[in-house]
Image: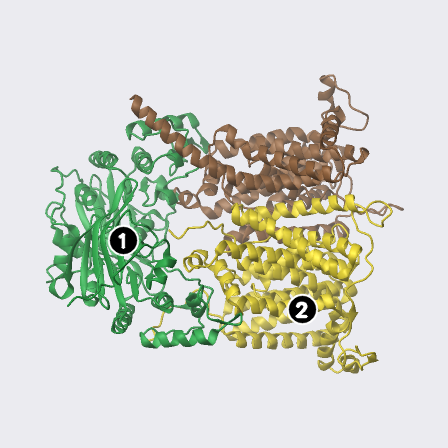
């Protein structure tokens, strides 16, 4: 009956979901506010334009999908370094099927191709007990070779493709804009573009919010719509169904799960195969939405950025998607306007200083000092340079991941048994 | 009038290679009672419980649950029969909530969706009924140890257990948590749940149990009503009326103190002290033994002495030097030998050849190395000598360590440590898993080294060993040294009482 | 990553041999599927490889693969994964190229300085990951992968903005200044000539081959003949036992990563002073990942790694002949990929089988010894 005062445990219990989501929403709105201010100060409208947001949304898509894949695998306790390879298989299979039969066949084939890679990884790690990282690296290498080989034997000269690319694919999965909000069509009638109208007004913050929403709302495609839906679906499966609970149990404490009758091996296989399937779907997006073609090297390291998104997103679907969105935003900015990237420096500086002040208010001096110090450094960088070298922008996602891991690891909660080789019957 | 026993075990026998863990065990547990099983390490309690819970199959004998004979092939069968086990080491996923841990594998669902409200309602209800309330949405990681135990109990109750087996449940609890646990157990029995309670802490056992069964050397010795017996009597049953008589010898101890420990304390998670205010001295030419049931802080004490764990209070000195802040390497180089309690985890490189294992612990010193360079020929010669002198059965020094039997592995470790001519030898359970012949040989070597001036700190749960070898004897319980005894005159009652937490002379 | 036990020689090569066999089988199937004859293909590859200029080419290709394999293997033996060799060697090559072109030193010295700079940079970049692991517990797999990307960006930036050679009219390539002759590695053509073999004009056997031999020797010496090497291997075999024997785990992690990075630096240096003489954005890629494959196939010991490097070099080289024979040369990448996957699976199986068998064999032997006594 008595509530004992125990010493605080190393991991603080995170607040319940609703409070966490509200906090995240407020943080996001706050960040947008700072961004609005910065954009005005540095005269970089691209920071807030719907075009940028739209591009960010699209660029984030493959990372988010692959990230969901990585999350599923780790949730059942298997580290999947091979996301890149599974994505490659997805791009190849997707392009080939789309070229031969049509875009939706491409999607299906991409998913199947990625799933095949996932199955291979599952067999190696779960059945044979191969180290997860080694297997992942091996699959990356193998997938690249397989893709090349298949290209050579399928795309003969004259077909428009060759060893390193496929012939051009006729069409994507159909694009449209959301009606009413973003000027989409309703039964042939072109509706007003409400968000666009608000954005054009140029009202501080409100227009920026409208732009944020307008970007993704325009030029939606069926494929991106599916991808967006997969985020809440993933959450639902993992946190609201018995299957998902068992999967998470397997990833947290496989011995306990087995003692309770959960089929550990089967669920690991499932999780890793789904992981590959999602990476394959990411490949489909690359091929059908971005390039309209399979090209060697198309994945461009996104499989690894996806891993970064998984960590940054704390192994939760919404977190992964948000992290992917952030990475996509940085990517979109550097493609559209280099001066805007420079403005981002000021944004980061203000953000860090703000976090430092908040830490100070909570009495955490050293943390406040390091955050504030970092903020000042960023400000100096902003003030003394005119642009950010584009090569630096290239590794922003990776550097951010490294920094998060270094400084905020205590707040992250990876699945406890991720990466450990599990042998059946460890119970006794 | 006779009541159908909840559990009846008749003539249970279980053999493992080299040892008979259970020999003709008979146990009757009545429904709705708290039945305690007591005994020292190696008495066979854990094996018996594993059999009852379906994790092991008995070689002979029969099990009856509620009068019907059963044969469990796995824990799932036992769960289905209404038996639930609360393990000594919790099986909980820290990142999941209480609710999720409890329902894992038996989730209530409606149309494919987890019925969380139903689960939450049931857990709250059970918690209220059994004095075990918990916030179902808290992460298990954020719970105290006592609360985690409650989750384990809820887990088995949720699956409809009518018989609970608790394996050393109070070992990790502070006194207030023990009280809360007992309140929960009383509520459970009031509702008809039967409880089997395994422990070596006799005063707790007497506080909660209705009947007590004592096990010793793999068999059941007696079953008594708790009200009719004292802790001292139980202790005597546990330890046996015969104690090994120490061989007559004159003490070789000198005045020179080799190891001095002062006020050593090691803190564990929560408020618990794993080692508390331990002070002792070991002189050259003497063997100091620490007796006690495992889990009372001996392992942590040894780790602190070796530099593998930093103590929260106290000092350690070797000879005249304060080594409290020294690294493990420095301590080993200064002449501390170490025979770890788990040879596979800490004593050997199983995949490496025997001669490399002989070097382990002194790999930078003569004869194995000089100025950073290994001297292979000298190392192999030394290894051959160790094999010979300690009678380690192996074809040669090149075979990998995993290929040796457990007893030979232990002899190897003992040999390399003793032949390394240390100043102080810290040996934890040095003859665990070793056959009788090898055991005698190891004891002889320890004695010989002691006679030559070695200071030895011996930790063991084997009474033959600890009484037979020690010149002075301490008993460790609950992290403290609760008694210093003379091995020549110690009696089973006194030893047993101290080992189980009683106070000398208590009735 | 478990190190391999003292398993009788036959079993030890079982995994790699099995893997190669499986890979050949899979690629044979692939060839049949496209209507090519496996026998003809493989024999064409072998015939091509037997030519002198092919042998030289294979040796040259094997040099960076071998060094990269050593870099990865050092980590594996300790239980660490250095996936970052890729970034480490490129950054090392860039800095060494730029610094080496700044001054002119006497012939032998200059070369040594350039190589040393490369090793130092590689060591530092890898050491960064080691520090992060020891100080903040960041797992080295993630940190080295992320640092790879940072290294790529950093190298591109430094090359374009600071280390770039003054552009000559009409030359669009971004590159560092060429290393003066005193910094270049002499070739080994004279040795071949002494053996009576004459090479085609323009091709040469790289002198870095000798460095490889030294590196392999050094690797072996370090690991099996020094106390540090003992501690390193013990940490990989059983970290707890290593700790109890006095090994300082934190220092071991950092030292290992530094060592691994130094080998990675050698990879970059080999290509720099042996062939390219400057750093451009076209500097060879993928050697770091190939090193992982080579280390896995070579089971983390120098001899195995050397053989694996030669095999991969052979596959790369013989790809050229396949082009002429109208066989998709990508079959060699398939072979490489399958080999890696097969070797890790086979390795697991072989290890378990061997362990069980050896335990039985030894107890048999002991029993016989006792019976005889």
Q: Which residue is mark 1?
A: B48
Callout 1–callout 2 Cβ contact below 8 Å: no
Whether residue A359 appears in this view of the structure is yes
Q: Is residue A325 left or right of residue B85?
A: right
Q: Is residue A245 left or right of residue B333?
A: right
Residue C294 image point, x, y percent? 62, 38
Q: Which mark is residue A228?
A: 2
Q: Which chain can be seen in brown? A: C
Q: Which chain can be seen in yellow? A: A
Q: Which mark is residue A231?
A: none
Up the image or down, B50 lies above or below C108; here it is below
Q: Give me the residue at 54% from left, 32% from top.
A: C14
Q: Is residue A4 left or right of residue B225?
A: right
- Badge nearest the viewer, 1 or 2: 1
Q: Secondary structure at mark 2?
A: helix
Where's the N terminus of chain B, which quadrant?
Answer: bottom left
Q: Give me the residue at 25% from left, 36% from top.
A: B442
Examine the image and state in which quarter residue A327 appears: bottom right
Colour in which the image shows chain B: green
Q: Is residue B463 left or right of residue B399?
A: left
């Amino acid at each position: 009956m008595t509530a004992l005062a125990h010493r605080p445990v190393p991991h603080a219990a995170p607040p319940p979901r609703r409070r966490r989501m509200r906090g995240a929403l407020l943080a996001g709105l706050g960040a947008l506010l700072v961004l609005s201010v910065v954009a005005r100060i540095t005269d970089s409208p691209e920071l807030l334009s719907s075009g940028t947001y739209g591009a960010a949304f699209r660029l984030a898509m493959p990372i988010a999908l692959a990230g969901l894949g990585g999350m599923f695998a780790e949730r059942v306790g298997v580290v999947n370094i091979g996301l890149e390879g599974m994505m490659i298989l997805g791009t190849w299979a997707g392009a080939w099927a789309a070229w031969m039969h049509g875009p939706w066949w491409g999607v299906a084939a991409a998913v199947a191709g990625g799933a095949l890679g996932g199955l291979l990884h599952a067999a190696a790690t779960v059945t044979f007990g191969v180290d997860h990282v080694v297997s992942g690296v091996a699959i990356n290498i193998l997938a690249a070779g397989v893709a090349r080989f298949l290209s050579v034997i399928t795309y003969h000269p004259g077909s428009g493709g060759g060893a390193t690319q496929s012939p051009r694919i006729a069409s994507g999965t159909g694009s449209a804009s959301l009606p009413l909000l973003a000027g989409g069509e309703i039964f042939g009638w072109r509706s007003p573009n409400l968000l666009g109208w608000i954005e054009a007004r140029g009202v501080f913050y409100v227009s920026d919010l409208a732009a944020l929403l307008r970007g993704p709302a325009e030029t939606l495609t069926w494929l991106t719509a599916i991808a967006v839906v997969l985020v809440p679906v993933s959450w639902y499966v993992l946190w609201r169904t018995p299957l998902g609970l068992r999967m998470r149990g397997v990833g947290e404490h496989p011995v306990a799960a087995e003692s309770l009758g959960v089929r550990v091996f089967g669920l690991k296989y499932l999780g890793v195969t789904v992981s590959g399937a999602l990476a394959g779907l990411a490949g489909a997006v690359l091929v059908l939405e971005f390039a309209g073609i399979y090209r060697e090297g198309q994945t461009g390291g996104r499989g690894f950025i996806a891993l970064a998104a998984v960590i940054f997103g704390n192994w939760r679907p919404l977190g992964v998607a948000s992290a992917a969105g952030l990475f996509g935003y940085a990517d979109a900015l550097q493609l559209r306007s280099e001066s805007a990237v420079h403005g981002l420096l000021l944004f980061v500086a203000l953000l860090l200083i703000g976090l430092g002040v908040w830490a100070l208010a909570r009495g955490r001096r050293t943390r406040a000092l390091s955050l504030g110090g970092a903020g000042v450094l960023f400000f100096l960088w902003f003030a003394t340079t005119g642009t950010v070298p584009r090569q630096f922008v290239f590794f922003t996602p990776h550097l951010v991941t490294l920094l998060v891991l270094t400084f905020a690891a205590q707040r992250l909660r990876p699945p406890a048994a991720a990466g450990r080789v599990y042998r059946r019957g460890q119970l006794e | 009038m006779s009541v159908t026993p909840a559990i009846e075990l008749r003539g249970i026998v279980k053999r493992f290679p080299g040892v008979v863990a259970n020999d003709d065990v008979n146990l009757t547990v009545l429904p709705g009672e708290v039945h305690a099983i007591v005994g020292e390490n190696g008495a066979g309690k854990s094996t018996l419980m594993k059999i009852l819970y379906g994790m092991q199959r008995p070689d002979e004998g029969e099990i009856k649950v509620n009068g019907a004979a059963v044969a469990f092939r796995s824990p799932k069968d036992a769960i289905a029969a209404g038996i639930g086990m609360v393990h000594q080491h919790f099986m909980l996923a820290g990142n999941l909530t209480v609710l999720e841990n409890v329902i894992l594998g038996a989730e209530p669902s409606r149309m494919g969706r987890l019925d969380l409200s139903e689960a939450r309602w049931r857990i709250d209800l059970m918690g209220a009924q059994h004095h075990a309330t918990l916030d179902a949405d808290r992460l298990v990681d954020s719970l105290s140890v006592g609360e985690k135990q409650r989750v384990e109990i809820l887990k088995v109750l949720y699956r409809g257990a009518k018989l609970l087996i608790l394996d050393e449940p109070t070992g990790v609890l502070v006194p207030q948590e023990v009280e809360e646990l007992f309140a929960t157990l009383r509520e459970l029995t009031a509702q008809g749940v039967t409880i089997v309670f395994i422990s070596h802490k006799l005063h707790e056992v007497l506080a909660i149990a209705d009947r007590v069964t004592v096990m010793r050397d793999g068999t059941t010795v007696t079953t008594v009503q708790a009200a009719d017996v004292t802790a001292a009597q139980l202790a005597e049953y546990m330890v046996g009326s015969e104690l090994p008589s120490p061989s007559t010898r004159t003490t070789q101890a000198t005045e020179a103190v080799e190891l001095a420990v002062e006020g050593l304390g090691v803190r564990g998670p929560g408020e618990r002290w794993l080692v508390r205010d331990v002070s002792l001295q070991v002189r050259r030419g003497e063997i100091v033994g620490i007796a006690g049931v495992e889990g009372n802080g001996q392992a942590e004490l040894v780790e602190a002495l070796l530099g593998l764990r930093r103590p929260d209070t106290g000092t350690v000195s070797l000879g005249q030097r304060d080594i409290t802040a020294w690294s493990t390497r420095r301590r080993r180089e200064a002449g501390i030998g170490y025979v770890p309690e788990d040879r596979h985890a800490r004593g050997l490189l199983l995949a490496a050849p025997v001669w490399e294992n002989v070097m382990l612990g002194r790999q930078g010193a003569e004869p194995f190395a000089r100025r950073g360079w290994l001297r292979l020929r000298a190392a192999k010669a030394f290894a051959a000598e160790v094999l010979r002198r300690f009678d380690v059965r192996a074809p040669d020094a090149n075979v990998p360590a995993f290929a040796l039997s457990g007893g030979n592995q232990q002899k190897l470790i003992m040999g390399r440590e003793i032949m390394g001519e240390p100043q102080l030898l810290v040996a934890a359970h040095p003859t665990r898993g070793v056959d009788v012949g090898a055991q005698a040989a190891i004891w002889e070597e320890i004695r010989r080294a002691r006679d030559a001036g070695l200071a030895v700190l011996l930790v063991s749960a084997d009474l033959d060993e600890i009484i037979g070898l020690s010149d002075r004897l301490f008993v460790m319980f609950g992290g403290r040294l609760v008694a210093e005894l003379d091995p020549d005159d110690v009696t089973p009652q006194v030893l047993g009482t101290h080992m189980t937490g009683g106070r000398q002379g208590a009735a | 990553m478990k190190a391999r036990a003292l398993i009788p020689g036959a079993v030890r090569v079982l995994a790699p041999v099995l893997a190669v066999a499986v890979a050949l089988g899979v690629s044979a199937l692939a060839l049949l599927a496209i209507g090519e004859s496996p026998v003809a293909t493989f024999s064409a590859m072998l015939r091509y490889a037997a030519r002198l200029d092919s042998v030289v080419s294979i040796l040259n290709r094997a040099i960076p693969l071998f060094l990269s394999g050593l870099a990865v293997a050092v980590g594996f033996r300790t239980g660490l994964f250095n996936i970052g060799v890729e970034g480490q060697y490129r950054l090392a090559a860039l800095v060494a190229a730029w610094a080496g072109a700044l001054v002119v030193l006497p012939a032998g010295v200059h070369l040594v300085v350039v190589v040393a700079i490369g090793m130092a940079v590689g060591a530092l970049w890898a050491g960064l990951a080691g520090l992060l692991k020891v100080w903040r517990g960041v797992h080295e797999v993630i940190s080295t992968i992320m640092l790879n990307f940072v290294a790529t960006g950093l190298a591109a930036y430094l090359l374009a903005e600071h280390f770039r050679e003054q552009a000559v009219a009409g030359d669009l390539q971004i590159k560092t200044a060429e290393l003066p002759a005193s910094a270049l590695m002499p070739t080994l053509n004279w040795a071949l000539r002494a053996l009576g073999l004459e090479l085609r004009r323009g091709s040469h056997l790289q002198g870095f081959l000798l460095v490889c031999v030294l590196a392999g020797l050094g690797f072996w010496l370090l690991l099996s003949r020094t106390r540090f090497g003992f501690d390193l291997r013990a940490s990989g075999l059983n970290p707890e036992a290593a700790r109890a024997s006095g090994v300082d785990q934190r220092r071991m992690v950092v030292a290992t990563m530094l060592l691994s990075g130094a080998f990675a630096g050698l990879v970059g240096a080999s290509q720099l002073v042996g062939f390219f003489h400057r750093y451009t954005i076209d500097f060879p890629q993928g050697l770091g990942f190939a090193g992982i494959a080579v280390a896995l196939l070579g089971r983390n010991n120098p001899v195995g790694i050397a053989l694996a490097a030669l095999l991969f070099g052979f596959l790369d080289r013989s790809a050229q002949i396949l082009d002429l024979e109208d066989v998709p040369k990508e079959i060699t990448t398939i072979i490489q990929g399958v080999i890696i996957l097969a070797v890790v699976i086979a390795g697991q199986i072989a290890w378990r089988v061997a362990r069980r068998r050896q335990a039985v064999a030894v107890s048999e032997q002991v029993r016989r010894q006792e019976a005889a006594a």
